[in-house]
Amino acid sequence: MADNFLERRMEELHDGKKKTIVKRVGQTLDSLMMKNRSHRGYDPDAPVSEELLKRIVEVNTRIPSACNQQVLRFRLVTKDESAKVLPLIKMGAALPELHLPFAGTEPPAYIIICSKEKETKLVDMDLGISAQSMLLKAVEMGYNGLIIGAFNKEQLKEQLSLPYDPLLVVAIGKGIEQIRLKEIKEDESHKYYREEGVHIVPKVGLEDLVI
Ligand SMILES: Cc1cc2nc3c(=O)[nH]c(=O)nc-3n(C[C@H](O)[C@H](O)[C@H](O)COP(=O)(O)O)c2cc1C
């Protein structure tokens, strides 16, 4: 089934005598998940406003949280301030020869996820749920992103005068990369690579995931 099957499907509902046609305009979870690829190059002509970042962060008012602790806090970085973040993050460590991002395609905005409490296993679980939920929201709104764990914590905290320790950086923008998933067996290389400009991401198939 095409992943946008439900988007295009016309659903007929009967309410008594009247027949109503309802067009589903929402996106399926599968289509959002497919579009939710890690982008390391962004459209320089598509700026990201603080308002847009707030709508993305709003998903955190609805996500699960271990013991309902809700200790994560979010610093929004847009416009000129984004230049402070760029030298402190590392993108595409598996492709060092490319020196990503390419000049002119740097992320226009970031969400810095911080924690009010010391980082623990439970905080990290909340962190993953938060980051993925925000990326899915970004994709739903026609944007893309990248989770960045490789960054200079101390310098980022200082540069942005953060009141709490930063745990993850999420870049947000309109991705311009061509990215494809490739199903692999679990014993094949998991390393992403590029083929004629297309970024290929190997993913272990369902058969090997189920034990
Ligand atoms: C916790 C976490 C940390 C990550 N840190 C980085 C990073 O520092 N730099 C980077 O370029 N990508 C980073 N990534 C992105 C992964 O490389 C990416 O998810 C993986 O290659 C699979 O690609 P996909 O997200 O398109 O499926 C991170 C992903 C996660 C979940």
Image (tube, helix red, strand yellow):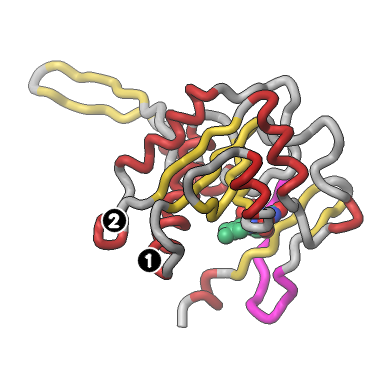
Mark 1 / mark 2, whichever is N-terminal:
2
Q: Nearer the viewer, residue 156 or 110?
A: 156
Answer left or right for 144 relative to 175. left
Asked if labels 2 and 1 touch by Cβ distance under 8 angstroms, the answer is yes
At 85% across and 46% down in the image, what residue appears? Answer: 197
Please provide the residue range marked out in magenta. Answer: 179-190
> Which residue in the protein does label 2 denote?
69
Q: How many marks?
A: 2
Q: CA distance from mark 1 to mark 2?
A: 9 Å
Residue 46 rendering spot, x and y as whole percentages: 67, 22
At 56% across and 47% down in the image, what residue appears? Answer: 34
Tell me: residue 101, above or below residue 54. below
Q: Ligand 1: which quarter? A: bottom right
Q: Nearer the viewer, residue 164 or 28?
A: 164
> Which residue in the protein does label 1 denote?
122
> Furthest residue to the left?
16
Tell me: residue 184, above or below residue 58. below
Q: Residue 208 got which mark? A: none
At 61% across and 70% down in the image, what residue appears? Answer: 204
On whether residue 184 falls in the magenta region, the answer is yes
Residue 105 rendering spot, x and y as whole percentages: 79, 33
Answer left or right for 171 relative to 25. right
Answer left or right for 165 relative to 20. right
